[in-house]
Amino acid sequence: MATTATTGLPEHHVAHHFDSAQQEFDSNKMGMWLFLASEIMMFGALFVGALIFHTLHPAAFNEGSQHLDWRMGTINTFFLLTSGLTMGLAVIAAQSGRQGAVRLNLVLSILFASGFLVVKFIEYKLKIHHGTLPGRLWHGEGFHDPYVHVFYGLYFVMTGLHGLHVLIGMGLMTWCLIFRASSVQFNRKYFTPVELVALYWALVDLIWVFLFPLLYLIG
Amino acid sequence: MEHSENELGHLTTKNMVVGAYVALLVLTGVMLCLSRLNTAALSVDWLDVHAIKVTLIMLTALVMGVIISMFLMGLRYESKLLNMTIFASNFVFLLIFVLFTWADTSFRGEIDPTFNQHINFVSPVKAEPAGAQGHSVAP
């Protein structure tokens, strides 16, 4: 088995059912794009739901939005964008075969993603305290518009589903860090796991970039 | 784009990733500044300033989305026709979905006022009494 001089890790072997490394890479990437397209469809349906209710009850959305802390949303945007940067740097490191830099950037991405979840946890805790929960769990008081519960229903479903994606993304980064970065040498010929996790993570960023203004800013 | 046997995909560069990151941070700042604008003070009769503000904020988000997909996801360098087709068809579907829903919910009954008497688009959820505690909100 061929190994590299710098890390001593074995090089990746193209799976037997592929003709070449190029075909393997292209197939993997196309599968990922199809999956990302289905993700965009799923979130798209929720965004359309938000659009309908926003059109029907603009005052409720305004009132609900004002009870969200835009500063926490901004901190979370910073965390996600920065983790997007470190994932991009991890791809660059993987392409140039710098295994240590891949590990470092993956760890940084996981840390920033954790920061996002900590802020989200604080926000959820406040919302639970105020009773602004979705559906039948709603027991919020002191609101003027009778439809504010619709805004919070959408808020919990959309940020909850996005938060689940953050959690899954962190799991994928950890998998990349523990299993892939220590068992195979990344280089210009093989960096697929880091590339695909970075693609997934960019989608998580992409969705948040629309969620943040929709829920926190426009009201 | 043809690749040699030893080169897979597009080579991501540091300038590209860092440039996209800086642009995204700046645009987040722009979005925040826009949202802090007091439209009530700027309000004029013939112009819906709030609607313009909301449109500008969402357009900024759209630009951020384009930067993420083009540079961080590398769509700009995605040479494979198939992957571009997946993304483009997905985007077109979403555009039709959003635009038609928006047009329907916003303008239903406006062209023919009597039409609204027959098909009135009402909220599918019940209103929660203001200040209510522990009530069901199911329709």
Image (spheres, grey):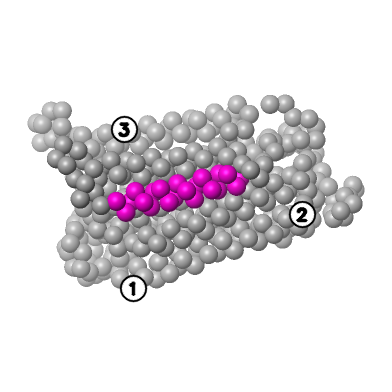
A198 or A45: nearer the viewer: A198
| Quadrant of the frame with the C terminus of chain B | bottom left
On the rendered structure, is B72 left or right of B42? right
Residue pointed to by mark 1 = A129
Residue for point 56% across, 61% down: A112
Give me the disc on residue B100: 3
Percent position (x, y) of residue A23? 73, 33
In this rendering, which labeled residue sits more in front, label 1 or label 2?
A: 2
**Magenta-highlighted residues:** B17-37
Residue at screen point 30% across, 44% down: B53
Tell me what residue is drawn at x 58 percent, y 33 percent. B76
> Is A129 within the magenta?
no
Q: Which three-letter amino acid code belongs to the residue tagged 2?
A: Gln
Q: Position of residue A21 (x, y in %)?
A: 77, 36
Q: Residue tagged by mark 2?
A: A99
Q: Where the N terminus of chain B falls, by quadrant? A: top right
Nearer to the camera, A151 or A87: A87
Disc 2 + disc 3, Cβ < 8 Å? no
Q: Which amino acid type is marked by label 1?
A: His
Q: Amino acid at mark 3?
A: Phe
Please tell me which residue is depicted at 46% across the width and 61% down the height of the picture: A75
